[in-house]
Image (tube, helix red, strand yellow):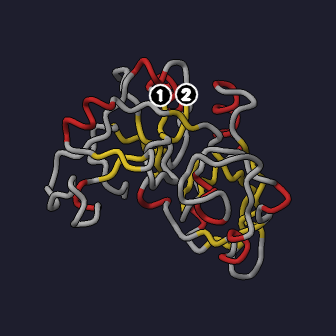
Amino acid sequence: MNGAPFVLCSEQHTRTYIDPGYKSLRLVRALGPSSNPLGKTGFHVLCAGIPLDPATFPKSARWYGRKHFLADINTSGHLIYVSDRFREVIEKIEPNVHQFLPIDLSDSKKQLLARRNAMIVCRTIDATDEKAMAAQGWVLRQGVWRLPSDLPKDDPDYKPYRKGGWAYIFDPTKIGSNAMWYDQRRLVRGPHPYVSADLANVLLSASLTGLNLKPVSNSASSID
């Protein structure tokens, strides 16, 4: 495994629907200022890279998938649900950085299936290689990278959509010793944080179920 970072995901079959309640998530508040231009409350704050106020976060959620799809990592909507095993691995590598909010997963009969942790990634960094990104055609607007086809048609940098060739390229010197983060120049962030190659190796060695790591050389369009 080389030094390039990876996108942290869960395996396709573990991405079931987990519902903590639409109204409940709208009430979630951040504990500090957000670098996400979409805002610091509600759904957008879940992937803003900053701690949340635990008092505003749901304590339970309904699990809609098959019970045997419960894994060490499940993703649904804007959230990452992890087991204590997963949490321990992260906290060993980056202690006192990320937030793990306890949440009970129950079935349709309100029977407790599992106790999990909603993993809130609490770090954002600007790690992209600006020259390489611009060379691909990305345009920096309001602090985030945009496809030229997403810009208004009267914008001088607007261009029709070009299929393929849109990759996020990182500068290793900007990543430094960071193990898990959201990139502050990416508008739509999650629940797919970036992880360093070192952390990816540790996660793989721990034999965590549901784990899926995607090289960042993949298309920078939406992660399935």
Q: Which mark is residue 36?
A: none
User: Label 1 is placed on what type of residue?
Assistant: Ser
Q: Viewer-proximal residue, 162 or 181? A: 162
Residue at position x 47%, y 38% in the image: 194
Discs 2, 1 touching: Cβ within 8 Å: yes
Q: Position of residue 61 (x, y in %)?
A: 71, 69
Where is mark 1, residue-wise? 196
Residue 14, relative to residue 92: is it above or below?
below
Residue 40, relative to residue 96: is it above or below?
below
Q: Position of residue 40 (x, y in %)?
A: 65, 57
Residue 6, relative to residue 119: is it above or below?
above
User: Label 2 is placed on what type of residue?
Assistant: Ala
Residue at position x 76%, y 59% in the image: 103
- Tell me which numbered mark, 2 or 1, is placed earlier along the sequence: 2
Identify the image quadrant of residue 97.
Answer: top right
Tell me the element at label 2.
loop
Q: Position of residue 73 (x, y in %)?
A: 57, 49
Where is mark 2, residue-wise? 179
Location of the N terminus by quadrant is top left
Residue at position x 16%, y 57% in the image: 159
Residue 175, relative to residue 103: is it above or below?
above
